[in-house]
């Protein structure tokens, strides 16, 4: 998966680096969509894997009991736990399959999300961890299969996941996320409303993003304080305040989308 994901991101970067392309940011959207197809079609539909946080809880329990580190855990470790120490929440900007759909919604507004709604993510994160834990504790899922099936006494592993169950979680989880994401985008007039209000993964990456190596930063050109960066930022970051004071963007909400870089008339951001 690393090769197609790398190629997809490279295609996006190449398109956006082309000075003839007037719609800056189009390349990132294309790259993001290609990554989403890699993950959803190959891992989700063909391999019956689920990269949502709920399935990660199942596989973490599997790892604790068997010592087997599966590719779902590899994905989560790289993209959402240790990787953000390098690229912050770059996964949200360049690899999230939920955001890949939301980015193409025909919504021109970019309204600011009131802070009180951002706390909903905490509740969603708790439920995303609690629900699979309850399934694991009880040993059964809602279609009368064992999610972790007890093996015979002659076999060494205490349980193993069913592919059918993984596919059900994959379909259900993604359908729910897409529906909620589209509804929130329409209600709040903001494509990335889901990321600010509902996404539990955002909280998983917040601490690492704060100290990540790669950040949006001042270019050295003087900020003219036009406010375009703040107006267009999909994550409601006060970009202007960071740049005019000569500081890197330290906000854990930054997804490295580059919107502020592309929109700045003074080229004060890089």
Image (spheres, grey):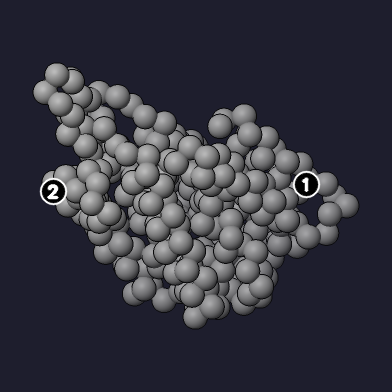
Q: Nearer the viewer, residue 162 or 252?
A: 162
Residue placed furthest toward the bottom: 187
Query: Horizontal and vertical percent for residue 90?
Result: 53, 46
Q: Residue at x 26, y 64 (%)?
A: 123
Up-down relation of residue 191 to residue 214 (above or below)? below
Query: Badge 2 is on which residue?
Result: 138
Question: Are there few (<14), some (14-19), or many (20+) residues within 10 Å of tag 1?
Answer: some
Is disc 2 placed on a helix, strand or loop? helix
Query: Horizontal and vertical percent for residue 168?
Result: 38, 52
Up-down relation of residue 117 to residue 6 (above or below)? below
Q: Nearer the viewer, residue 136 or 26?
A: 136
**Distance between mark 2 and mark 1 Cα atoms:** 50 Å
Q: Residue at x 78, y 60 (%)?
A: 23
First in sequence, mark 2 or 1: give its number: 1
Query: Horizontal and vertical percent for residue 154?
Result: 14, 19
Question: Could one spot residue 133 in this view of the protein?
Answer: no
Q: Residue at x 57, y 64 (%)?
A: 102
Up-down relation of residue 258 to residue 102 (above or below)? above
Left or right: 45 with respect to 64? Answer: right
Query: Horizontal and vertical percent for residue 62?
Result: 25, 33
Query: Badge 1 is on which residue?
Result: 15
Q: Nearer the viewer, residue 3 or 142?
A: 142
Q: Are marks 2 and 1 in contact (CB under 8 Å)?
A: no
Left or right: 266 with respect to 160? Answer: right
């Amino acid at each position: 998966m690393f090769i197609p994901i790398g190629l997809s991101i490279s295609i996006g970067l190449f398109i956006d680096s082309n000075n003839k392309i007037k719609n800056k940011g189009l390349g990132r959207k294309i790259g993001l969509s290609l990554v989403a197809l890699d993950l959803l079609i190959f891992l989700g539909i063909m391999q019956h894997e689920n990269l949502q946080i709920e399935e990660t809880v199942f596989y973490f329990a599997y790892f604790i009991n068997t010592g087997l580190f599966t590719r779902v855990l590899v994905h989560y470790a790289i993209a959402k736990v240790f990787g953000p120490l390098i690229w912050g929440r770059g996964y949200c900007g360049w690899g999230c399959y939920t955001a890949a759909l939301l980015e193409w919604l025909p919504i021109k507004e970019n309204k600011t999300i009131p802070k009180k709604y951002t706390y909903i993510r905490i509740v969603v994160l708790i439920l995303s961890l609690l629900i699979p834990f309850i399934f694991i504790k009880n040993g059964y899922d809602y279609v009368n299969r064992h999610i972790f099936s007890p093996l015979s006494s002659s076999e060494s592993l205490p349980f193993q996941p069913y592919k059918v169950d993984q596919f059900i979680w994959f379909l259900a989880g993604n359908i729910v996320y897409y529906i909620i994401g589209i509804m929130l985008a329409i209600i709040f007039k903001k494509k990335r409303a889901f990321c600010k209000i509902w996404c539990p993964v955002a909280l998983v990456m917040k601490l690492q993003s704060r100290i990540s190596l790669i950040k949006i930063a001042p270019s050295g050109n003087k900020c003219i304080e036009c406010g375009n960066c703040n107006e267009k930022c999909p994550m409601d970051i006060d970009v202007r305040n960071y740049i005019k004071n000569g500081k890197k963007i330290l906000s854990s909400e930054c997804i490295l989308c580059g919107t502020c870089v592309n929109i700045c008339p003074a080229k004060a951001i890089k």
